[in-house]
Image (spheres, helix red, strand yellow):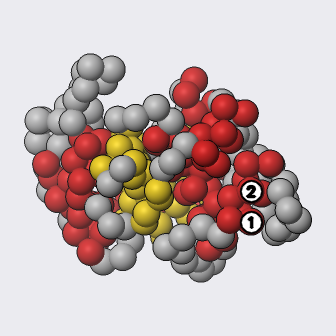
Amino acid sequence: MSSQLTPDLLIRAYSVGLFPMAESHDDPTLYWIDPEWRGVLPLDGFHVPRSLRKAVRHGGFRIHVNTAFRDVIEACATPTGNRAETWINPGIRNAYCALHDMGCAHSVEAWLDGELVGGLYGVSLGQVFFGESMFSRATNASKVALVHLVALLRQGGFTLLDTQFVNDHLKQFGVIEISREKYRIELARALAGRATLPFEAENAIIEAVLLGTDPKQKPDGA
């Protein structure tokens, strides 16, 4: 339990499998979480429902990376009618914004008619992306951002997408649970590698994600 959070502390924590949470968005106390069972999304096993494929291709969203990080994390921290409470307090917001300034935290944003309507943020170290939270103010906005995140991770050479937990929403995309011990093995392996999050996903990679094809192959005319 701690009320002090710095970028360096966050990096050390993620490197050993820990992540911070608060009881509520206005509670200053932080807790370090180390789940017995960890949610991960296999990048080669990502499932895109048919309706979401249509939204990605024809939904009108423009996807940007790292253009509105603070806006994304503040939206994720804000309680809504469908989400009465969040675990992101001001200390978490400030620390992750500082981590973003260091190039280790990123946002993937969905824009519609010039307005930020959805997105997600997370932390990247080595070949690992630690997904933190997402928000949506328009139908499918955060889901489209997730599709683009998976494409970006495949394109950039990432091997592990950590979702922390598993819920029914994430299960539809192929998220699975692995034991703490297995997670630590995969984490150590991925941390030893190098990857870079691109600023834009290639259309062919997005199509490979939508169609569930080998991420190393670019489909012809899909």
Whole-percent x, y for residue 176 in the image = 67, 37
| Residue type at tag 1 | Ala
Q: Which residue is mark 2?
A: 207
Q: Left or right? Give the position of 59 relative to 121.
A: right
Residue at horizontal 12%, vertical 35%? 27
Q: Left or right? Give the position of 177 relative to 142.
A: right
Q: Rate crowding at label 1 as few (under 14), some (14 to 19) or many (20 or more) other CA atoms within 10 Å.
A: some
Please state which of residues 5 and 211 is positioned toward the viewer in this rendering.
211
Residue at horizontal 59%, vertical 40%? 55
Residue at horizontal 32%, vertical 54%? 114
Q: Rate crowding at label 2 as few (under 14), some (14 to 19) or many (20 or more) other CA atoms within 10 Å.
A: many
Quarter-wise, where is residue 39 in the image?
top right
Whole-percent x, y for residue 172 in the image = 65, 30
Q: Is residue 169 above or below residue 62?
A: above
Whole-percent x, y for residue 103 in the image = 36, 76
Q: Which residue is mark 1?
A: 204
Quarter-wise, where is residue 216 in the image?
bottom right
Mark 1 and mark 2 in contact? Answer it, CB < 8 Å.
Answer: yes
Please state which of residues 35 and 74 is positioned toward the viewer in this rendering.
74
Q: Left or right? Give the position of 120 relative to 10.
A: right
